[in-house]
Amino acid sequence: QVQLVESGGGLVQPGGSLRLSCTSPSDIFSADTVGWHRQAPGSRRELVASVTKSGNTYYQDIAEGRFTVSRDRVMNTVYLQMNSLKPEDTAVYYCSAQMITQYSVADYWGQGTQVTVSS
């Protein structure tokens, strides 16, 4: 079982920035992939960006050029730096960790952190 804890959400004006953090009591770097997802009211949860164990990053078009995923091994934390925020970025943001073994694929989720972009 992997516990994930997100933080860093809040209210920000359009054009502003936020940095979300995802940490765990266990070694988050042991996850095969750590992803950032979001879910707006009335919408499905969608992947925003992810980083693999080897450090490869992936961004959805909505995040490309504005969001950056990074990792800090000392802090055992994965970050999502969000710049140039828009009202349509308003959502609950979730961190996920995928663990792949020879026998199974397991996905773990955090509780989410609210991001509200509004003037």
Image (tube, helix red, strand yellow):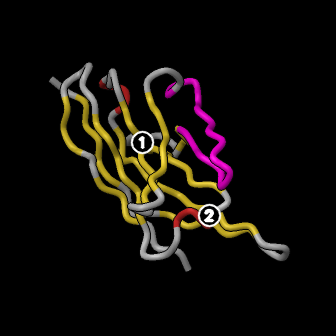
- Residue at the spot of label 2: 31
* Numbered disc 2: secondary structure: loop
Q: Amino acid at mark 1?
A: Leu
Crowdedness of circle 1 by 10 Å Cα count: few (<14), some, many (20+)? many
Q: Is residue 28 above or below residue 26?
A: above
The label number, if any, that marks residue 21 in the structure image: none
Q: Amino acid at mark 2?
A: Ala
Query: What residue is shown at x 45% (from left), y 44% (from top)?
Result: 38
- Residue at the spot of label 1: 80
Q: Where does the image place residue 49, in percent across and percent down from the top left?
A: 55, 39
Residue 15 vs residue 110: left or right? left
Crowdedness of circle 2 by 10 Å Cα count: few (<14), some, many (20+)? many
Query: What residue is shown at x 78% (from left), y 72% (from top)?
Result: 101
Tell whether position 61 is magenta: yes
Location of the C terminus by quadrant is: top left
Q: Where does the image place residue 106, in percent across and percent down from the top left?
A: 67, 69
Point out the residue furthest to the bottom here. 1
Point out the residue furthest to the left here. 119
Label whose residue precedes the other's in the sequence (2 or 1):
2
Query: What residue is shown at x 34% (from left), y 46% (from top)?
Result: 20
Q: Where does the image place residue 58, in percent across and percent down from the top left?
A: 63, 36
Residue 41 vs residue 47: left or right? left
Q: Which residues are magenta?
A: 49-63
Residue 10 vs residue 100: left or right? left
Foreground pick, 100 / 38: 100
Location of the N terminus by quadrant is: bottom right
* Numbered disc 1: secondary structure: strand
Tell whether position 3 is magenta: no
Point out the residue furthest to the front here. 74
Foreground pick, 1 / 45: 1
Q: Where does the image place residue 104, in percent across and percent down from the top left?
A: 78, 73
